[in-house]
Image: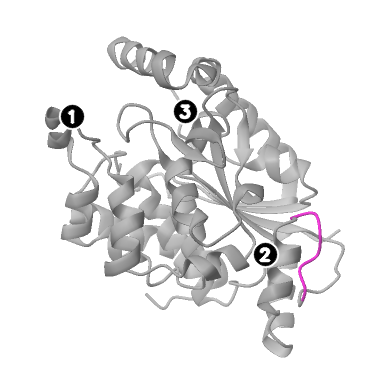
Amino acid sequence: MADALTVLTRRRETQRSGPRPDERETQRSGARPGHRREGLPDDGARIALVVEGGGSRATYSAGMAAALEDQGFGGCFDAVYGVSAGSLNAAWFTAGLAREAMAPWVDRSVMRSTISPRRMLRGGPVVDLAHLVEQVYVHEFPMPFDRVLAGPFHPMATDAITGASTDLRPLLTTPDDVPRALRASSTLPVLAGPPVPLQGRRFVDGGLAEPVAVHTALAAGITHLVVLRTHAAAHVPVEPPSVVDAVVRCWLRRHAPGVLGPWRDRVAEAARTEAVLDGLGDHVLQIRPPADAPAVSRTSTDLGLLGEALQVGYAQVSTKWGYSAL
């Protein structure tokens, strides 16, 4: 079977020469990543876009997603998986608005209202996801939740009781479920408030159980992956300082006891994920920031730094195809 880049390029050419897929059929088949989406060639491949998170570091994957969209790859995927803040970028990409979605990352009002360490002194969350998805994504930078639901969007979260990595797609029944799923996928322990309820269950950040949704995608029948990463290839996950570890463990015991195991094993799980990706050979295309890319923290609101990360992410995709439009 062809490599991931060849499959993706062929699908782009097919889309350019043929009709666009019907949204209703996309909703039916796009929700099941092991099945071919209507309008895509029956090439024997099932290809997924997987978008890594990392808080503000997801500016890198936001730029990458915009570049993929600009180059005509928007409708080429059987499934689009988003983990943590990567689920925000995945949703915008699914809706066909990845380029427009770069703007909130460098909007002073949006970033300061979404991320504010001072709020913790008043008992509020450092990262206010409710404000982001229920206010910003509704009134300031409207996200068409109906279009997200109609597409092959798969937000990932961690079950607060079992600690299992969970594809929230089967729990999305109406467009109103989409913003709640975005919150559930991105709710970092301590920083972003309590677990988010959805369809009788409670969830926290998807990256705790599955930092890159490769295991879920492969189990669902995906044969090829395009993975938008937010760390350079040389990055090695390390344990947090003991004080941070103790605070997170205390929070998890109170709010999400099932996640204590994934939290304890997260460095080993990250290594396992990298081994699986490496074993896929040319069936996976990983796009990463370069080694000299600026470091972006999870809670950065430095607009200059975030803007640079957007441009770097965009360029990493563009240079693979010799194209630039930013």
Question: Which quadrant of the rendered structure holds the N terminus?
Answer: bottom right
Q: Is residue 84 visible?
A: no
Q: Which residue is mark 1?
A: 123
Q: Which residue is mark 3?
A: 236
Mark 2 and mark 3 lie on one chain; the one further toward the N terminus is: 2
Q: Is residue 147 magenta?
A: no
Kind of residue at disc 1: Gly
Calculate the distance from the C-alpha at mark 2 to the C-alpha at mark 1. 41 Å
Mark 1 and mark 3 lie on one chain; the one further toward the N terminus is: 1
Secondary structure mostly taken by the magenta-highlighted segment of the chain: loop
Q: Which residue is mark 2?
A: 77
Q: Quadrant of residue 35?
A: bottom right
Q: Residue 6 appears at what percent x and percent y?
A: 73, 66
**Where does the magenta region start and end?**
33-38
Q: Residue 134 appears at what percent x and percent y?
A: 34, 56
Calculate the distance from the C-alpha at mark 1 to the C-alpha at mark 3. 33 Å
Secondary structure of the residue carrying tag 1 is loop
Q: Farthest residue to the front: give it.
A: 200
The residue located at (67%, 58%) in the rendering is 79
Instruction: Decide if residue 240 is on the left or right side of residue 305.
Output: right
Q: Quadrant of residue 27?
A: bottom right
Mark 2 and mark 1 lie on one chain; the one further toward the N terminus is: 2
Kind of residue at disc 2: Phe
Q: Residue 172 appears at what percent x and percent y?
A: 59, 53
Q: Residue 240 appears at what percent x and percent y?
A: 36, 19
Kind of residue at disc 3: Val
Secondary structure of the residue carrying tag 3 is loop
From this view, report whether residue 298 is shown above or below residue 305: above
The tag on residue 50 is none
The label nearer to you, 1 versus 3, is 1
Secondary structure of the residue carrying tag 2 is loop
Q: Is residue 164 visible?
A: yes
